[in-house]
Structures are given as structure tokens and as C-alpha cells.
Amino acid sequence: IINNLVTMPSGYITNTLAQLAEEHSEVLINISMSTLSDIECRVLDNRLHAGAIPLVTPLSGLDYFDLYSESSFLYCGKNHPLFGKCSKMELDELKKWQAVLPNYAITPEAAKLHQLLDCKATASDREGIAFLILTGKFLGFLPDHYAKKWVEDGFMQAVSKEKMHYSTPICLITH
């Protein structure tokens, strides 16, 4: 499973695991958190039976079953100069602020939005992006379900929410 899906409001994975444990107590469940490419490779070579990944580029030899649609928004931290002014931002003004670029595979839609930013940092996962946003020095995209607690607690705020967002399908893959 890719990381940070446990905060998705729809509990497909949790519910499926519960059902599997209930109906097939003889099955040994082994969950590991990994990268998109690692999960794809391990399912392709039969080291894994299934994986949950974002649909970025479908690979032949894998079957994809939709689980979720994950919405991501651009966020700033509470100590960022944009905090409290986020809804008034013009897209061309975003280049003035440093941002985080994921160094993992993202959809073409997400890549296009990152090109509007001045990406001066990279992160290997969502937690790294969250750390950098929370510094108050960087803008970054996070799934809304993952950022929710920080937003509710006043530590993060969405920037240009109407324009700076994208959706990513999360799929179950099998060989």
C-alpha cells in the first residue's frame, strides 16, 4: 500500500481487510508501505498478490480496480506570508513563493500544476511534503484527507483552492 491512505474517509481497504480476516482466518495478512514502482514490480513478479497505488501510468500485465478518487490541494503553513490571504491569490503570484516538488511519480495533471510553482525543495513522500509546508517556508500539494487535521488545527490552509487542486485515482492492482 502507498503511504497515507489510512486517513481516507472511505474505508475500502480497512473494510476489505476486516472481511478477509473474518472470513479466512487461515490467511496470513502482511501489509507493507512502499513506493508506487516497488508495488507494481512486486505484483508483476508475483511477490505480492495485490497492491493499492495511485494510477499514474497503467502498466500492461496489471489489472486496475478503482478504489478511491483522492483530491489534493496546494497548502501553506500557518507561518507562511500567504496564510490568511490564500483565497485572494492569483496564479501568477504563486511563483514568488518556494514550493515542494514530489520526487515520486505524479499524474500529468499534477505535474502541470507544479510547473506554476517555484519548486526549490523535493520530498520522497507526503510526510516529507507536510514537514516542509509546516515550516511556513514552502507551498506544497497534499491530499485533503491527509492535510485535514492540520487544517482543522490551524496549522495549514489551502491556497487558491478553486484552481490549485487535482484528483488522483487510487486503484487496487493485481497480476
Image (cartoon, rainbow, N blue to C red):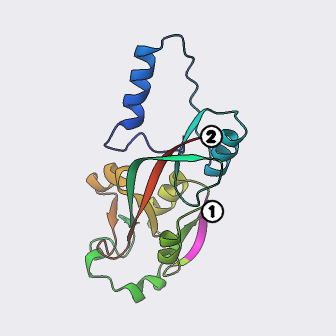
Give the side of residue 60 with respect to residue 137, left or right.
right
**What is the crowding at mark 1: few (fewer than 14 residues within 10 Å), some, or many (at least 20)?**
few
Residue 29 to residue 132: above or below: above
Please, what is the three-letter code of the amino acid marked with disc 2? His
In this rendering, the answer to whether 68 lies above or below 75 is above
Q: Residue furthest top?
A: 26
Q: Mark on residue 126?
A: none
Identify which residue is drawn at 48% across, 11% down.
25
- Looking at the picture, does residue 104 appear above or below residue 171? below
Query: Residue at image x 63%, y 55%?
Result: 59
Q: Front-most of 110 and 4?
A: 110
Per the image, the residue denoted by label 2 is: 175
Instruction: Classify residue 165 by image quadrant.
Output: bottom left
| Viewer-side residue, 103 vs 15 | 15
Residue type pointed to by label 1: Asn
User: What range is drawn magenta here?
Assistant: 119-123
Secondary element at tag 1: loop
| Percent x, y of residue 115 | 53, 80
Which residue is drawn at the image coordinates 35% and 56% (left, top)?
144
Residue 51 vertical placement versus 149 (above, below): above
- Label 2, secondary structure: give it: loop
List the residue tagged with mark 1.
103
Residue at the right extreme of this rendering: 45
Upstream in sequence: badge 1 or badge 2: 1
Residue at (35, 64) in percent of width and height: 78
Please identify the quadrant where the N terminus is shown. Answer: top right
Q: Residue 44 in magenta?
A: no
Q: Position of residue 87 (x, y in %)?
A: 26, 76
Label 1 vs label 2: CA separation? 26 Å
From the top left corner, tell me how far across and down residue 47 is, in percent. 70, 33
Give the number of callouts.
2
Q: In front of the other: label 1 or label 2? A: 2
